[in-house]
Amino acid sequence: MTQTIAPRLRTLVLLLVAAACALLAGAGPASAHAALTGSDPREGAVVDTAPAQVSLTFSESVSTDDDSLRVLDPKGKRVDDGKPSGTGGTTYSVKLHAGLPDGTYTVTYQVVSADSHPVAGAYTFSVGAPSETSVTVSGPSAGGGFVGGLYGVGRYVSYTGFAVLVGGAAFVLACWPRGSGVRVLQRVVVSGWLALTAATLLLLLLRGSYTGSGKFADVFDLNLLGEVLQTKPGAALVSRLLLLAAAALFIAVLFGAYDKREDEEKRDLTFGLAVGGSVVAAGLAATWAMSEHASVGLQAGLAMPVDVVHLIAVATWLGGLTALLVALYRGPADTPVPALAVRRFSRVAFGSVIALVVTGTYQSWRQLGSWTAFTDTRYGQLLLVKIGLVAVLVGVAYFSRRWTAQLAEATPAVAGAAAARRAEKGAGKASAKAGTKASGNASAKAGTKASGNAKVAQKESGTAKAAGTTKGSGTAKGSGGSQRAAQLARQRAAVDAARQKRQRDADPNRFGLRRSVLAEAGIAVVLLVVTTVLTQTEPGRTEEEAKAVGGSSTAASAPSTGAVTLDMPFDTGAQNGKGVVRVELDPARVGANDMHLYVERPDGTAFDIPEVKVALTQKAKDIGPLPVAPDHITTGHWSASGVQIPMAGDWEVAVTVRTSDIDQVTISKNTQIG
């Protein structure tokens, strides 16, 4: 039966690793956490004169440097004065050179959001009239390429290591104290510590390149590393390394002094280890909460401790599940996982699920903000996948609890047999020890061991020839007999261990529990991957807010769709005759187009006027003017659909604004259409 389980286990692990790689590969740098919500000049705008500066507004505060915001002329030459300056908490501007000629200018931005993720994008605006531009935004960028992929793997390994470290230690301390002496459990917890430590060092080295150039060579730039250490994410990673040093001391005590104590003495040490371990685990979880999603946005003071509880609950459940799975499959046959330990873990896991539901509900509300965000945003869609995986995991855990109950009923007989084997083994050790002490020299010790082992061999094979080697055979013969006896003893121990393992695995209740726990662990691996991808995805609330003001970070970084926005100041000379009319033509191509006109006062408030008309003219081909009569929609807003553009080229857009019966003015701008 066990021979068929091992290949299945290896196959499942390979499939889960492949699924993890596929999901991580799909998490690209477009998943930003600070969205570009506005710009001046606007994307695609055509202005009469060159602006004195370019301003960008984000959904949250960002970190900038000298190259964060750049403005390039049509030939690709930089025309800004350098480092951006903050003007309104979330608005950042950079001054432009004076006397810029007409043409199309490209604005590129590369910043780091408050929750430590890079945000990059580009757009264009024109002065006078659009022109051809040789600027291409390509090459390594923040959060992408090989460095971005490696950083994503490092994040996944760090979450996995944290879960295995915290959950494995909690399983030993709270569910199976005797497990502190089981070698495979020791390896699980130590492996979690090593994985988290290595991943933290990797993330610290990659951080500068990840948020900057994206070049792998910059990983070894010590100056860049020094800059990273001065940032909030860098400080969080260094703090994590210091806490991991304390975790190493905790592991040494747990698998050292604690394992050597008797049961009565263990009770006194358990409380201290529980308190110290909880403090270290909470500190490690806080290094994520204080530098990522929870640290920005709504109710950050409440969100950070909630995030700490959420991470610890995940680690206790999934890491404990890993420890239980390894103990069931790889644990020694003479020390099987007792049903009491499984029942204790079942209660701990149930409490963790309750904590996950409560904290996860709050986090979902905070990051989504609306029901529609579940389906309309990538964050919401991933969250639905996560919720589904948790539901399946809870369902599988229900079957594990049933197997646990059945295993508990069959435990007394198994425990009695195990106790008898331990007593027999202890008696054998005591006898061998007494025989060793009775011998007066090294030769007598060898003879005693050879004689004892020979008797064992005689009982096993029916011959006593090896026993005679201790009398009158010399030193060489005595040594050969001792080696033969030791070999026979090892063979007998291996046969006995195999027999015990077959008896253990033949228990249908334990076999059913192993299968259900294996299924839980498989689902947990995928769940952890989805959770990691979620931490790199723009929250649904931020994405919807960005869409509401005219674009998201994804849209801002994408190539222009061709839509044209023209801002035209007007002054009819009458009282209240000043304002700005904004014309939006979408998609600004040959064929049918949608046109929107917005009329605003100089202070930005919308207001109505008696009449507004538009005419389109292409003087080079002697086409037009083509009149457009938009319909009034609401205060300060007119719209016309199906506006036909017969030919691509440079078009003049003339707008006639009438503010009274006799006061009107016609203003115009040229723009490239098609």
Image: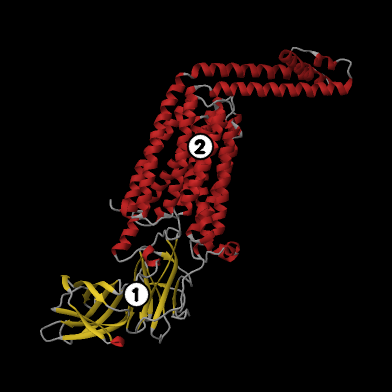
Residue 136 placement, left or right of 251: left
Which residue does the numbered mark 2 point to in the structure image? 322
Nearest to N terminus: mark 1 or mark 2? 1
Name which residue type carries label 2: Thr
Q: Which mark is residue 44?
A: 1
Of circles 1 and 2, the one toward us is: 1
Which quadrant: the C terminus? bottom left
Which quadrant: the N terminus? top right
Where 173 sits versus 467, above or below?
below
Residue 225 placement, left or right of 384: right
Pick out the residue farthest to the left. Answer: 661
Quote the CA–CA distance across marks 1 and 2: 54 Å
Identify the image quadrant of residue 567.
bottom left
Q: Where is residue 218 in the image (x, y as percent from the top left)?
A: 58, 64
Q: Position of residue 517 (x, y in %)?
A: 47, 33
Q: Which mark is residue 258?
A: none
Q: Position of residue 477 (x, y in %)?
A: 86, 21
Mark 2 packing: few (<14 Cα in 10 Å), some, or many (20+)?
many
